[in-house]
Image: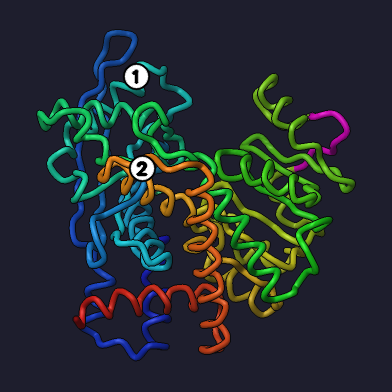
Amino acid sequence: MELENAKNTIKKAAEKLNLSKETLDIILNTEREVKVNFPVQMDDGTQKIFTGYRIQHNSLLGPYKGGIRYHPEVNLNEVSALSIWMTIKTATLNLPLGGGKGGVICNPKELSEQEIENLTRGFIKKIAPVIGPHKDIPAPDVYTNSKIMDIIVDEYSKTEGIPIEKAKAVVTGKSIENGGSLGRDTATARGGQFVLKQAIEQTKIIPTLENATIAIQGIGNAGGNFAKLISKDNAKIIAISDSKGAIHNPKGLNINKVLEHKKQTGSVMNTPDTICMTNEQLLELDCDVLVPAALANQITEKNADKIKAKIILELANGPTTPEADKILEEKNKLILPDILTNAGGVTVSYYEWFQNINQEKWTAEKVDEKLKEKMQNATKEILDKKEKYQTTTRIAAYVNAIERLSRKLEN
Ligand code: GLU
């Protein structure tokens, strides 16, 4: 389903641009699809075969770039859609990178640390020939982190027989000790914050972020860091959730207390002074900004007309279905689309890769300053295109990205 959706959005944007069929075909089709099956040594002494993918969608603007996710529902269709979104995302931010994505079908919650390490090494051994600092540069995604990225560098260096120092730029999102960039861990959330601020300033849909009411679905890297950042802007977080459910307090949550409760008990549920509800109920709360920051397909034709938020800030990849998009647009909601909103992650990934290649180390302030400029410019460009083409923010973002890709084809 996701793949069809991604392609249809590209087609709609192509119509606005009168794109030639030849150019459109290149953008619609994936350059390379890799599927691997590999053995993993389990803690009980047995060996299990796992399946993984690396999809390389498009390299017109540079080496393929995109995360690797570990999730039981990873499948070819979804990874392919995610790889298309990466192509559009890097083009949206005007980065010299293409789009790719990877995933392994597994349930990381049921695997030990050692098994996750074995699985990572097994996967990288198999995809090593198609990745590389100037070929395809993976990064973290759902249920993968800096520790796993460090293991990837080590395994890639061993498999390809190249020194660790030279292997570092094969992956981004590494730990700081192993060549990661300052600011990469909070980059997705920080990028989303810059997008939201710019959009508020430009559209005046709500007066300021201060005192704005916000509901956040998800408290992982994106949602959790976003909540921390906007509390410092004095925004009022009235609800937040994890996979077990949501908590709500119309007067505002103390995010540090919520995070502490999650650390102690494993979930946000039953944090003192809050009302428990479902993830679905959170989406329908009366608030200024709704932030889907978990998985795809959360806002659908079933609940779109019940969404009360004025702005939808898509920190997750693909949280809104096309049917829901239509309903929300008719109700004049401002959707800040995933390919813009969560692109802070890949932007700082690019800065990390650049620092690795050029043996530089940037300060946190420099990373933040550059990220701010990129995100503000991209938001402004897209909101301006929305006016110019009289279209939705999502299509405007695709138009902007496809223009960049097609210019490359024509030159
Ligand atoms: N997985 C993230 C995304 O979907 C980051 C990709 C990257 O940093 O390359 O954008």
Q: Residue furthest top?
A: 45
- Relative placement, left or right, of 163 versus 238 is left
- Decide: is 38 above or below 247: above
Query: As shown in the figure, which amino acid type bears the numbered disc 2?
Result: Ala
Which segment is the magenta one?
271-277
- Decide: is 193 above or below 386: above
x then y, percent, for residue 336: 59, 66
Q: Is mark 2 within 8 Å of ligand 1?
A: yes
Q: Is mark 1 within 8 Å of ligand 1?
A: no
Circle 1: element type: helix
Q: Nearer the viewer, mark 1 or mark 2?
A: 2
* Residue 68 seen in this snapshot: no
Mark earlier in primary sequence (1, 2): 1
- Relative placement, left or right, of 123 versus 403 is left
Picture quadrant of residue 121: top left
Q: Which mark is residue 99?
A: none
Q: Inspect the magenta stretch and tell me whether residue 154 lies in it.
A: no
Q: Which residue is mark 2?
A: 139
